[in-house]
Amino acid sequence: MVSGANVRFATALLVSLTCFGVQQAHAQAESEDPIRFAINDWSSQLINSHIMGAVLQQAGYNVEYVQADAAAQFTGLERGDLHVQMEVWSTAQGELFHQGVSSGKLVDLGETGMAAIEEWWYPLYMKEQCPGLPDWKALKACSALFATAETAPKGRYVGAPPNWGGYDDERVAALDLNFEVIHAGSDAAMFAELDSAYTRKAPVVVWVWAPHWVPTKYKGEWVEFPKYEPACYEDAAWGVNPNAKYDCGKPRGPIWKTAWAGGKAKWPGAYEAISHFESTNDEQSALITEVEINKRPVDEVVSEWMSKNENRWKAWLGK
Ligand code: TMO
């Protein structure tokens, strides 16, 4: 039998060993194997991955950056081919994330503090041309306004690259919108379309997200679709179309960090540090502006962030 005193001794020993272990983790990397960050094709994700990578390098970890498809990456993260994803958007990636976490293959490293919106967006001048906006039914009535040579007689909606998800093709069908989704090849292509229309005050409706500089630089609004509820994506009977799912807008909510579950025992200090990473929409918008509008290299913007925010990132490392 174990006496109470022994239990107390064992507990005290365990606590002191644990503290020692944590300090060790902060002083140096537990494994020299590189931690592979999945890199996607939008700027904040690139910037935040490089910020976190630079912070981990300060603690002695090796890091690598691997370009990854925003949808297919989940399989890579679950298998351990990729290790860390700094931005999982609840607006379009929530299902893949929750599946990975509930299967035990991904760990949830918490929210980034950023609040995500992704939705159909139009410049404010469209309200004169299409009274009734932002209600989605107005968009339906005005679809012909948005037609282009490519889509006529249907309206054109400039959507995101297909691997960003979001169910816009399903949304168009479910809400019987007389629109065609033209998936842009990149964020730059989407915003080139927006910019060209905006300067001519021409009709345009495009996928815009926050945090980003676009909804600040251009005056506009998001279309108000029927408000998202989980049942809208799960149950055809829900909503205005009793025979189809996705008859609502996109969810809004947090942006999470996630990682391969198998890496938690290998790099515990790194996972702990990533769990502490946080930012704000305003900070993100400013960082993306530096890279996309002021055309500064990501490395330079990241080094500047590192020198201005030493107290913040040291705290993430427990220092
Ligand atoms: C790719 N994004 C989550 C910004 O839409």
Image (spheres, rainbow, N blue to C red):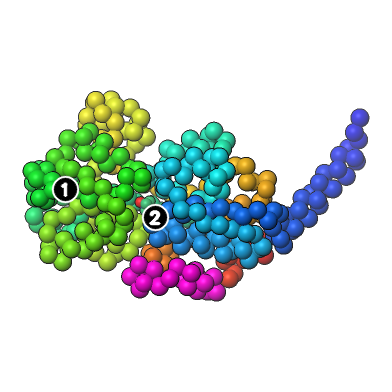
Which residue, given by chain and number where applicable, does mark 1 sit on? 156
In the rendered structure, does residue 294 fall within the stretch colored magenta?
Answer: yes
Residue at (72, 62) in percent of width and height: 27
Residue 106 relative to residue 173: left or right: right
Report the number of numbered marks: 2
Looking at this view, is 109 or 42 the one in front? Answer: 42
Spot occupied by residue 160 in the image (x, y as percentages of width and height):
29, 49
Query: Disc 2 vs disc 1: which is toward the camera?
Result: 2
Q: Is residue 99 above or below residue 117?
A: above
Magenta span:
289-308
Residue at (62, 59) in percent of width and height: 62
Residue at (30, 60) in percent of width and height: 188
Spot occupied by residue 173 in the image (x, y as percentages of width and height):
21, 34
Quadrant into which the N terminus falls: top right
What is the secondary structure assignment of the residue under circle 1?
strand
| Camera sees residue 137 | no
| Camera sees residue 14 | yes
Quadrant into which the C terminus falls: bottom right
Which residue, given by chain and number where applicable, does mark 2 sit on? 41
**Amino acid under disc 1:** Arg
What is the secondary structure assignment of the residue under circle 2?
loop
3D distance between C-alphas at marks 2 and 1: 23 Å
- State yes or no: Cβ of the residue under disc 2 lies below 8 Å from any atom of ligand 1: yes
Residue 22 relative to residue 49: left or right: right
Q: Is residue 307 above or below residue 47?
A: below
Residue at (12, 64) in percent of width and height: 200
Q: For label 1, count other residues whose C-alpha is less than 10 Å away and answer few (under 14), some (14-19) or many (20+).
A: many
**Amino acid under disc 2:** Asp
